[in-house]
Image: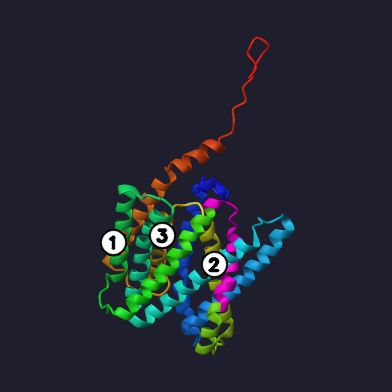
């Protein structure tokens, strides 16, 4: 079964994805504070995010290897996984930043995160034989509607075709990364920590020349604050969130993964109101409630799938039955 191949129950996989989505949502607020504290550009920030996250995960990997033997996999398969996942992550991040620059944050977010579940649902049906069903399809549509209301509810958006194409490219990179993570998780031997390390290494190499062209070393009048913000971005919404994402995406159906990760704009909206002083609007509340309801419904449906029930049965402790000489031996 796909959920037992990686050794993680579906319930814990869902929890990993929920925490990862919420953590991803904090990256936007942290990035805004980084831009206020320095002249760092978005590509340079993405590079330092991945490169520093890579260093943190390598340190944790070293501690884990001392505590016990990590999961081993063939070098050819690991190289393929690292290359494809790292390129997918690089396309996802870089194309999204370019879309934000071309058509604005709201449109880029809606197109990227909205196209993701659709592409993933189609890809999962064609390549993984995963079916959503009517309830799952309704939950996906509800989540997309909530996303549109949440992000576009304020109005004043401008749609530019070039930016939309870049956002679709970003969604394609995210979809490939999610589908392949799920496929490899079904095959077994998945190691979320190693997957994150390899992906960050490839992504950092891909982003390095663009970061150098943009200006890799920022200028700031408050270096301590900048270092603290960069450390947070590297630790929480990067090293922690992506490790949890790769762990959860290996055992949860791909379409469910894509909808749960829509918690990112919800988390970002909450932080924008609480920390950045943005105004709480009716659209923010309505979009958040619709999106959260769809995510909750899809998560409950995922936990009731036949695969999840099989895991609960297999993990149920066996009862100890006593017997006497007059009773037949088992």
Q: What residue lies at 44% left-to-right and 41% top-to-bottom?
A: 306
The answer to whether 219 is drawn above or below residue 25 in the figure is below
Residue 297 in the image: above or below residue 198 = above
x then y, percent, for residue 274? 40, 69
Mark 3, Cα crowd under 10 Å, few <14 / some 14-19 / many 20+, is many
Q: Main secondary structure of the magenta part?
A: helix
Q: Are marks 1 and 3 in contact (CB under 8 Å)?
A: no
Mark 2 vs mark 3: in front: 3
Residue 194: % across, % down: 61, 62
Which tag is nearer the camera, tag 1 or tag 3? 3
Pick the front one: 299 or 236? 299
Q: Secondary structure at mark 2?
A: helix
**SS type, badge 3:** helix
Q: Nearer the viewer, residue 19 or 191?
A: 191
Per the model, the C-alpha gap separating discs 2 and 1 is: 28 Å
Secondary structure beneath label 1: helix
Q: Where on the picture, by quarter, is residue 284? A: bottom left
The residue pinned by badge 1 equals 145
Look at the image and tell me in which quarter the C terminus lies.
top right
Give the label on residue 236, or none: 2
Tell whether position 111 is magenta: no
- Expressed as whole percent of the image width and height from the top left, the position of residue 37 reads 50, 84
Inter-mark Cα distance, 2 to 3:
20 Å
- Residue of label 3: 258
Residue range in magenta is 186-205
Q: Of the residues under marks 1 and 3, which one precedes in the sequence?
A: 1
* Of the image marks 2 and 3, the number of the one nearer the N terminus: 2
């Amino acid at each position: 079964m796909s959920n037992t191949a990686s050794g993680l129950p579906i319930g814990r996989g869902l929890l990993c994805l929920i925490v990862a989505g919420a953590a991803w949502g904090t990256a936007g607020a942290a990035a805004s504070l980084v831009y206020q504290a320095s002249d760092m550009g978005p590509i340079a920030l993405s590079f330092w995010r991945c490169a520093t996250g890579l260093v943190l995960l390598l340190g944790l990997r070293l501690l884990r290897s001392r505590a016990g033997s990590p999961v081993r996999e063939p070098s050819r398969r690991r190289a393929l996984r690292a290359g494809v996942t790292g390129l997918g992550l690089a396309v996802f991040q870089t194309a999204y930043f370019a879309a934000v620059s071309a058509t604005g944050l709201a449109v880029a977010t809606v197109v990227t995160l909205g196209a993701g579940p659709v592409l993933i649902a189609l890809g999962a049906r064609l390549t993984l034989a995963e079916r959503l069903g009517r309830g799952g399809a309704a939950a996906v549509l509800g989540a997309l509607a909530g996303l549109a209301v949440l992000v576009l509810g304020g109005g004043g958006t401008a749609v530019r075709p070039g930016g939309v194409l870049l956002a679709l490219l970003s969604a394609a990179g995210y979809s490939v990364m999610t589908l392949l993570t799920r496929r490899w998780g079904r095959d077994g031997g998945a190691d979320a920590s190693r997957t994150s390390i390899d992906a960050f290494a490839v992504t950092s190499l891909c982003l390095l020349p663009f970061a150098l062209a943009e200006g890799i070393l920022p200028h700031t009048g408050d270096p301590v604050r900048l270092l603290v913000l960069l450390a947070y971005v590297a630790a929480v919404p990067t090293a922690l969130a992506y490790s949890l994402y790769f762990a959860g995406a290996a055992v949860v159906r791909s379409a469910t993964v894509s909808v749960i990760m829509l918690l990112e704009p919800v988390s970002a909206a909450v932080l924008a109101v609480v920390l950045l002083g943005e105004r709480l609007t009716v659209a923010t509340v309505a979009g958040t409630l619709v999106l959260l309801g769809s995510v909750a419904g899809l998560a409950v449906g995922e936990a009731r799938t036949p695969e999840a029930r099989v895991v609960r049965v297999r993990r149920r402790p066996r009862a100890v039955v006593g017997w006497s000489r007059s009773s037949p031996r088992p």
